[in-house]
Amino acid sequence: MAIIMTESSYERRVKALYEKQIRMEALEAKFIKKVYKFNSNLLDVKEAACRHQRKVGKLQKVIMERREELDKRVSFIEELDRELEATKLRSLAMKDRIKQQKMLARQRKNEIMESIHTLSKTTGTYINQEALPARVKGVTVLRGDKRNQLIPFDLKSTDVEGLDSLCQHLESLNVDMAQWQQLISLAMDVAMESRAPTTPPKEAANCNSIIEIDLTSPTCHI
């Protein structure tokens, strides 16, 4: 009877060990399954991380390109602002120069008109400004004790011989030809400047050159 009890106890121990082994194998299988699932999930995470990293790299590249483009635009705008400021400064300088030139031109014209007025009174010669530069038209007044003598003239500015004869005639009457010639020259200059926009350049140059030749002719000087 004692021997049977011993075997029964052995069987129970073996059975317990077998059951324990089965449980261990089950736990091991469950653990392996979890490890496999974990590794699978880890692989998925790594692949997702790689995809995300590639997306981040592309995004960073786009950001860099946009940043470079923005820097170029900022540089362009800054350069444009500098150019605009320089243009404004040049425009202001140009306006100042034009204003100064107009002021000088008015001053010069006033001086010329004053000289014309003085020479007109000195020589007794009055020029028709409307006729210039095409014609030299006016009158020279020779003042006498009893009466004044009027010497009218109306010649084309291209009439060299006529102007030469007029100069000789006035010279014979003791008219100061230097002042008379200066009066005609100044009056011609004023007429040329006032009619510059409507007078053809060739015609204006032709009139100016002929008057200069006529008035500086040796036969017209005292």
Image (cartoon, rainbow, N blue to C red):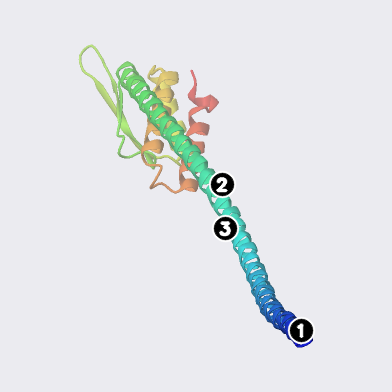
Residue 165 pos. (x, y %): 44, 32
Q: How much space separates mark 1 and mark 3, taking CA atoms? A: 93 Å
Q: Earlier in the sequence, mark 1 or mark 3?
A: 1
| Mark 2 residue type | Ser
In the visual, does 61 lie left or right of 102? Answer: right
Q: Quadrant of the N terminus?
A: bottom right
In the visual, does 165 lie left or right of 35? Answer: left
| Mark 1 residue type | Ala
Q: Residues within 10 Å of mark 2 (few under 14, many from 20)?
A: few
Asked if the residues shown at circle 2 and circle 1 are in contact, with their CB atoms under 8 angstroms apart, the answer is no
Q: Residue at x 79, y 85 (%)?
A: 3
Which residue is the site of mark 2?
A: 75
Q: Nearer the viewer, mark 1 or mark 3?
A: 1
Give SS at disc 3.
helix
| Marking on residue 43 | none
| Mark 3 residue type | Arg
Residue in front for this viewpoint, 116 or 156: 116
Q: Nearer the viewer, mark 2 or mark 3?
A: 3
Which residue is the site of mark 3?
A: 66
Residue 218 pos. (x, y %): 54, 25
Relative to 45, say whether 209 is above or below: above
Which residue is the site of mark 1?
A: 2
